[in-house]
């Protein structure tokens, strides 16, 4: 579906802080690109990671050295040297900020493009994307791994555009999304339901129809083994799983990649990244590099398969700048 | 204190005029009084600027011919007094409809010994509660549109008056023009009579009520949260065969439903939701033991809901208020919301135009719930009746409610529930006030909530927003219910019985598609009583428990609708449910004589849907299950049939 810019802006309700988002989404659709949001609660210290100030005094720039990235003029801190090599494939936004000085309100602003209001529940970016580009293959258009943020929901959009929470912890051994495997009687139950509908002539209310829509979607998901397999991390090789890291964030990223490969329009993964600079202690660079190394490793498979980097958003407010 | 209207960066007025004294000082005294010219009022800056008679960044707000300009100018000419004329007390509002269909709102004031009437129309707001019936034009004339009834609300400051208007549907026969009398066997209960009269008033004929089996099913689902059991249906069928009246049937059905365990579960949950109790209401160990005992007594009919309310409010009887709400303002808002059906929270921060409740009302009512007020006789150090400019309240040592920076404790005062009542209430304790002055308000609130639970829609919506400017859809019905509530000493079972025996309940059970097409829209758009109510997870589990006749394990709640449906379709919960010893599915198979399972399918259909199923259709259902999994034995196929039935839309909502 082709959308004019004007129509898209109307539909998206003018998300002013990311003016190019609509174009990104439309371009993604045109070239089969999808949308993964990594919501990193806590937020990295930008001057210790992606926006170092090497020319500032030592009390500001911190103890970390800087490295050049593959993008001329752009430097990262030394622990991110692997990510630095891929910068020619990424778009780095250092100007992103929030007018809200409160974590909770800032998160709402970042996830919906609107400041919180007691009158309106705004849809999150995942639901907005899902509303525009959803196919009907039984794969939920918007998946949250393992669970959606409080403000990562559908808002005033229809309920079917809300996130499907996988639940559980993808980093733990034996992780499986519940209830995707059909019950032995599922086929029979669905057959009985269809027969009952034909026998009972009472028309259904809109609420009942909406609920029935979810049952149909559940039916599609259950009957389609391809969809079920997408949620199965066990189908990935141990090498790939190792490269993403055997923890919740890493395996969530891997699952998100599998799902957008399969056709889900948007995924969100959440994790806890490094803390703010005010919590940085000398001697903990190993911790920082370990975490970011795992994140960085995940880029390579993404890079080779999709040809573009995924976008990550910082949730952190200006409080720790 | 929120500020607004920063015209020049220095001149400021309070938001919504919430601080008249500060506004007066700003207009009259600030900047050496440069905004006023008492000798030449028309040259006052406060008039020149909004009329753009001098260069000004703001817009053209006033015209010289407007009543507001003239009033301001006269006031300046009179010396811009703080109080204009002798002190006056607002007595009442009156709204009248003139012969040319224009509205007029008059206010009556007591000035000294004199009662003065003043036309407030030009300064009032008017609106209709249903623009499809009547609307108010800019010149305050009424414009009638479609048939129905509506209220026109007139508001001046925080005071409200309303007028009830009817535009007839014109359905009643011109030959009779009368309401059909109730049948000889039908008890002429006041609710049904008033219901019919209200329909007649709008010119509508009485729609037929639902078939007996549908009314009875809805009664069981509404009262006990489960469908009627087959043996109950058999008993009621026998009464129908004997020619007993509908009223007798419903009475018997109510007796069965209200004595079942599921009645306790359903209404226990309802009471817990109403009282905003955390956790599982069936967990006897949690919460306040005294409160839990009271809940049980209310459910068994041995105690009235007013006693329960009194216990919650009385600190000697229950810890509930103090345990769950640390801030006295939260306690006050809970009591007003849950018991009085009044939204007080909006006035917590500041006054709102056209709102009945002021910040002072909120503050002083909250002071009634401070620890000192709850624990001892009221003896505040001193009090201030004005909120301070920097706003906000703070609790100091949990004893009194203080105004920050003032050192004053707020003097408690109960809410003036009657419009134009003096805010200074007499020395009545909170508990006594609940049982006396607030009694009718509480009855109204509870009646509305129970009506919504049984019928599907409320008479006043939202249920915690009873006010003059938010009238009930059927005021006469709500009045009757409230009177029943008070006369019956707030007995929960009694009021439930009255409602399910009434004609509105029987109409609420009707499927609009059972009416002929020509009358469907008119009757149901107007009545709007009947809406299928989707069962939530707990209600669905209760209903399935009722079908199977056993206590079932809880169903894990999923976070998204899709995940929920996947769980219903694929989880093993239902398998575990059918393994609970003594469940009706097990009993059915234990004594089965039909090898092919057709008879059992018919019985399952009656258990789930309260209706018989023909042999032909039973065969279709069973074959649908068998063909999907040909290798299954007959019992496994019947499990699939039962599972499909309880997942169907018809079972998953009260229709």
Image (cartoon, rainbow, N blue to C red):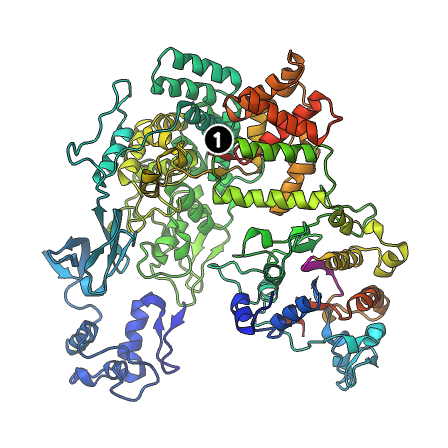
The x and y percentages for residue B533 are: 47, 38
Q: Quadrant of residue B615?
A: top right
- Please tell me which residue is depicted at 25% across the width and 33% down the height of the picture: B196
Whether B169 is drawn above or below B645: the answer is: below
Q: Is residue A2 left or right of residue B513?
A: right
| Nearest to the observer: residue B115 or residue B230 | B230
Residue B381 shows up from this direction: no
| Nearest to the observer: residue A19 or residue B448 | A19
Q: Which residue is mark 1?
A: B267
Could you classify mark 1 by the number of other residues whose Cα lies within 10 Å: few (under 14), some (14-19), or many (20 or more)? many
- Please tell me which residue is depicted at 49% across the width and 55% down the height of the picture: B396
Q: Is residue A70 left or right of residue B485?
A: right
In the image, which residues are magenta?
A: A264-274
Q: Quadrant of residue B487?
A: top left
| Nearest to the observer: residue B244 or residue B420 | B244
- Please tell me which residue is depicted at 29% across the width and 21% down the height of the picture: B186
Q: How would you classify the magenta stretch by its main secondary structure?
A: strand
The x and y percentages for residue A245 are: 84, 58
- Please tell me which residue is depicted at 74% across the width and 66% down the height of the picture: A275
């Amino acid at each position: 579906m082709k959308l004019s810019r004007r129509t898209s802006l109307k539909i998206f309700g003018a998300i002013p802080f990311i003016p190019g988002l609509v174009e990104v989404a439309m371009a993604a659709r045109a070239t089969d690109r999808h949308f993964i949001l990594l919501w990193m609660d806590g937020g990295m210290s930008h001057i210790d990671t992606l926006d170092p100030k090497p020319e500032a005094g030592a009390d500001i720039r911190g103890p970390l050295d800087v490295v050049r990235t593959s993008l001329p003029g752009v430097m990262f801190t030394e622990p991110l040297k692997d990510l630095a090599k891929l910068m020619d494939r990424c778009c780095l936004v250092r100007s992103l900020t929030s007018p809200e000085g409160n974590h909770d309100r800032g998160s709402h602003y970042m996830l919906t493009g609107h400041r919180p209001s007691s009158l309106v529940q705004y849809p999150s970016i995942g639901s907005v994307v899902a509303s525009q580009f959803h196919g009907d293959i039984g794969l939920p258009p918007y998946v949250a791994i393992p669970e959606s943020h409080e403000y990562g929901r559908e808002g005033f959009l229809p309920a079917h555009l809300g996130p499907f929470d996988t639940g559980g912890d993808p980093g733990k051994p034996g992780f499986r999304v519940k209830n995707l495997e059909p019950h032995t009687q599922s086929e029979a139950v669905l057959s009985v339901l269809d027969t009952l509908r034909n026998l009972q002539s009472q028309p259904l209310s809109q609420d009942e129809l909406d609920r029935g829509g979810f049952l149909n979607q559940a039916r599609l998901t259950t009957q389609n083994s391809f969809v079920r397999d997408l949620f199965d991390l066990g189908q990935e090789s141990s090498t790939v799983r190792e490269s993403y890291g055997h923890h919740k964030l890493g395996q969530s990223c891997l699952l998100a990649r599998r799902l957008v490969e399969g056709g889900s329009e948007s995924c969100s993964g959440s994790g806890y990244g490094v803390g703010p600079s005010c919590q940085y202690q000398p001697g903990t660079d190993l911790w920082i590099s370990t975490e970011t190394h795992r994140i960085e490793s995940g880029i390579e498979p993404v890079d080779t398969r999709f040809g573009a980097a995924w976008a990550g958003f910082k949730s952190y407010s200006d409080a720790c700048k | 204190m929120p500020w607004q209207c920063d015209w020049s960066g220095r001149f400021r007025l309070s938001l919504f005029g919430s601080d008249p004294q500060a506004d007066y000082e700003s207009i009259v005294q600030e900047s050496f009084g440069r905004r006023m010219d008492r000798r030449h009022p028309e040259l006052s800056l406060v008039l020149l600027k909004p009329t753009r008679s001098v260069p000004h960044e703001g817009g053209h707000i006033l015209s010289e011919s407007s009543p507001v300009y003239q009033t301001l100018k006269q006031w300046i000419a009179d010396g811009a007094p703080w109080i204009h004329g002798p002190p006056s007390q607002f007595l009442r509002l009156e709204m009248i409809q003139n012969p040319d269909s224009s509205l007029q709102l008059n206010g009556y004031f007591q000035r000294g010994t004199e009662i003065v009437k003043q036309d407030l129309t030009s300064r009032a707001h008017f609106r209709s509660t249903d623009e499809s019936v009547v609307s108010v034009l800019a010149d305050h004339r009424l414009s009638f549109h479609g048939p129905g009834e509506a209220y026109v609300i007139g508001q001046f400051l925080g005071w409200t008056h309303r007028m009830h208007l009817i535009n007839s549907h014109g359905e009643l026969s011109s030959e009779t023009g009368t309401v059909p009398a109730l049948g000889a066997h039908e008890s002429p209960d006041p609710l049904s009579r008033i219901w019919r009269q209200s329909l007649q008033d709008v010119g509508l004929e009485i729609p037929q009520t639902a078939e007996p089996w549908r009314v009875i099913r809805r009664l069981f689902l509404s009262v006990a949260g489960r469908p009627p059991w087959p043996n109950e249906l058999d008993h009621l069928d026998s009464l129908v065969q004997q020619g007993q009246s509908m009223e007798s049937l419903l009475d018997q059905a109510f007796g069965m439903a209200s004595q079942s365990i599921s009645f306790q579960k359903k209404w226990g949950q309802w009471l817990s939701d109403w009282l905003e109790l955390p956790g599982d209401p069936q967990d006897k160990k949690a919460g306040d033991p005294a409160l839990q005992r009271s809940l049980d007594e209310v459910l068994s009919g041995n105690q009235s809901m007013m006693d329960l309310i009194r216990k919650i409010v009385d600190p000697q009887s229950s810890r509930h208020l103090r345990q769950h709400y640390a801030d006295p303002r939260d306690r006050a808002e809970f009591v007003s919301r849950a018991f009085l059906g009044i939204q007080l929270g909006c006035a917590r921060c500041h006054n709102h135009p056209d709102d009945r409740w002021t910040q002072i009302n909120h503050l002083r009512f909250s002071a009634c719930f401070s620890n000192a007020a709850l624990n001892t006789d009221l003896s505040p150090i001193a009090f201030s009746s004005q909120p301070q400019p920097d706003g906000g309240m703070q609790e100091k040592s949990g004893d009194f409610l203080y105004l920050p920076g003032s050192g004053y404790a707020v003097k408690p005062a109960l809410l003036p529930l009657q419009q134009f009542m003096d805010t200074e209430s007499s020395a009545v304790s909170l508990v006594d006030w609940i049982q006396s002055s607030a009694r009718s308000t509480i009855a109204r609130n509870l009646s509305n909530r129970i009506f919504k639970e049984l019928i599907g829609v409320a008479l006043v919506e939202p249920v915690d927003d009873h006010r003059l400017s938010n009238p009930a859809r059927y005021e006469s019905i709500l009045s009757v219910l409230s009177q029943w509530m008070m006369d019956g000493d707030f007995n929960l079972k009694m009021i439930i019985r009255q409602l399910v025996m009434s004609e509105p309940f029987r109409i609420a059970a009707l499927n609009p598609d059972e009416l002929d097409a020509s009358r469907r829209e008119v009757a149901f758009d107007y009545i709007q009583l009947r809406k299928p109510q989707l069962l939530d997870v707990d209600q669905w589990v209760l209903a399935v428990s009722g079908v199977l006749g056993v206590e079932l394990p809880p169903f894990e709640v999923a976070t998204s609708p899709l995940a929920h449906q996947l769980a219903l379709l694929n989880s093993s919960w239902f398998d575990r449910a059918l393994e609970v010893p003594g469940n009706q599915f097990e009993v059915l198979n234990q004594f089965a004589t039909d090898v092919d399972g057709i008879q059992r399918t018919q019985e399952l259909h009656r258990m789930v849907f309260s209706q018989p199923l023909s042999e032909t259709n039973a065969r279709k259902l069973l074959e649908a299950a068998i063909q999907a999994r040909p290798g299954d034995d007959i019992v496994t196929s019947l499990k699939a049939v039962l599972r499909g039935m309880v997942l169907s839309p018809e079972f998953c909502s009260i229709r």
